[in-house]
Amino acid sequence: EAQLVESGGGSVQAGGSLRLSCTASEFTFDDSDMGWYRQASGQNCELVSSISNDGTTSYADSVKGRFTIFQDNAKNTAHLQMNSLKPEDTAVYYCAADGDGDKWPPGPVSCSILRGGMDYWGKGTPVTISS
């Protein structure tokens, strides 16, 4: 079964760093754009970052200069390097992939709607930043 598997979440203090990883199984990123959404407690999903299959990246204003998205195509894995973390970055982070480059609403948007609309949607990895 084709799926995305996230890893790398955890708990760190403000100012710290985490690297999230998203590995695709049974399909490749060659024909897909991929991205990371996050859902804070009680909130809808917001787009954190995305990378197209030609390497073009985009970031939410709230994470620009702190987060970096990149891919390791040899390992069929995408990463989100998160530096200078803040308590407001606390959320469940979801990896997603889709072949339609226009299907990346910035949000906030219902995570359920996103999950149903994207080609692939991971189960999420929690990130907790303490002050």
Image (spheres, helix red, strand yellow):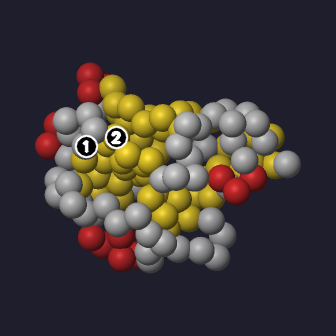
Which residue is located at x 52 percent, y 52 percent? Answer: 61
In this orientation, does residue 25 appear? Answer: no
Left or right of 40: which side holds 121?
left
The relative height of residue 125 versus residue 118 in the rendered view (above or below) is above
Question: Label 2's element?
Answer: strand
Q: Are marks 1 and 2 in contact (CB under 8 Å)?
A: yes
Mark number for residue 131? none
Q: Quadrant of residue 113?
A: bottom left
Which residue is located at x 78 percent, y 42 percent? Answer: 14
The relative height of residue 16 versus residue 27 in the rendered view (above or below) is above
Residue denoted by label 2 = 57
- Where's residue 35, x and y in %? 37, 49
Tell me the crowding category of disc 1: few under 14, some 14 to 19, or many 20 or more residues within 10 angstroms, Cα based.
many
Residue denoted by label 1 = 52
> Of 55 and 118, which appears nearest the observer?
55
Which residue is located at x 20 percent, y 39 percent? Answer: 53
Residue at the extreme top:
74
The relative height of residue 124 versus residue 14 in the rendered view (above or below) is below
